[in-house]
Amino acid sequence: MADSIFVKLTAYSHGAGCGCKIAPQVLDQILQLNVTAPDNQKLLVGNHQKDDAAAYDLGNGTALISTTDFFMPIVDDAFAFGKIAGANAISDVYAMGGKPVLAIAILGWPVDKIPASVAQQVIEGARAICKEAGIPLAGGHSIDSPEPIFGLAVNGLIAIEHLKKNSTAQKGDVLLLTKPLGIGLLSTAQKRNLLTEPDLQLMIRQLTQLNKAGEDLGAFTVVHAMTDVTGFGLLGHLVEMCEGSNLSAELYYSKVPVLSKAKEYIAMKTIPGGTKRNWDSYGHKIHFSNQINQDEAAIILPDPQTNGGLLIAVAAEGLSDVQQLLQSHHLYAEVIGTITDKKEDVVTVLE
């Protein structure tokens, strides 16, 4: 990689990573259709569902998975930003059990503020993560924009019988989350120049870790539903899973993985704006038991993640096999909750 001047990329963005996402209740309003969309029998997953990607029946027992994701810088290092944005976009294919096959880039760059050589580093980072995923970065599109923006459009393939959705959980399923929460807290600390170098490196390692286990999980019939945790936080994506499945969930707060230093940054008040937007959107659907620290939980559980872990609803009888697979990928594999009958509260958070 060619040498280039260092630019503090996060200084040029008003948000960071998936914390830039529009709040869930606002997105619902945007996506409301005032006209009836024409039916397409080959569209297996589309706007009528709150899933990670679209899925289209290719007519040969295989579905095309198509997704896009992009955001403003979550780190200052341009190469790392490209890797992170790429891994985050590719994750949507993994979250549906698919195999990614092709990516194209989406780049918005303030050419009058940041040198083109820095954008080149971003693209190189994306090429590196695509190579790790075994896919080509085959092209893309760029514009001159007020803030730096980068992401990918990604296509994947999957046998239709293996396609995973976020709306097909079943009563009695146990819940797994493969990566710890707290990325939003750490990334906000970085924007405020409070993040230590060791914590920065920890954050980058998690942000660039591909969710490759999702491709293997596609073949597991005991995996009833799957999604990845991103900008809406764990609670937001769990609410979507429950409401889509017409069920509720119990979440065991003490079992939810959290980055080791996250609570220290809560004390420094490095709380992303996206956390409040998330909580304002769905907090009324959540019930906390009296045994937990509700103020802390209401910061950690809605914390917006970027390239977060896979949230998996697994039949109890298949738990051991799924846990073994996750452990082989060096992922967190403890049960964090259970899917229950539908209740007035969508998610109940227990100790």
Image (tube, rainbow, N blue to C red):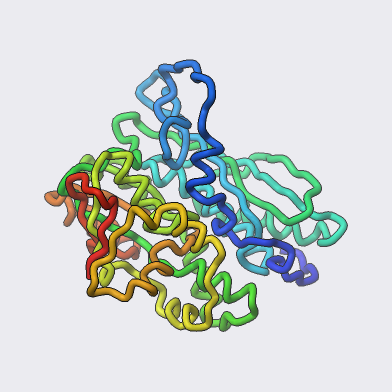
- Residue that lies at the very extreme toward the left in this rendered image: 317
Give left or right: position of 133 versus 180.
right
Q: Give the number of marks.
A: 0
Residue 90 percent across, percent down from the top left: 50, 47
* 33 relative to 288, above or below: above
Q: Residue at x 37, y 46 (%)?
A: 240
Give left or right: position of 349 versus 52.
left
Q: Out of 22 and 169, give the one closest to the viewer.
A: 22
Residue 92 percent across, percent down from the top left: 46, 45
* Residue 93 visible in the snapshot: yes
Residue 242 percent across, percent down from the top left: 29, 46
Q: Residue at x 61, y 49 (%)?
A: 70
Q: Residue at x 42, y 79 (%)?
A: 263
- Residue that lies at the very extreme toward the right in this rendered image: 112
Give left or right: position of 7 versus 126.
right
Q: Out of 341 and 102, give the one closest to the viewer.
A: 341
Q: Residue at x 53, y 24 (%)?
A: 34
* 38 relative to 291, above or below: above
* Residue 130 visible in the snapshot: no
Q: Out of 159 and 292, give the one closest to the viewer.
A: 292
Quadrant into which the N terminus falls: bottom right
Give left or right: position of 147 versus 93.
right
Quadrant into which the C terminus falls: bottom left
Quarter of the figure with residue 2: bottom right
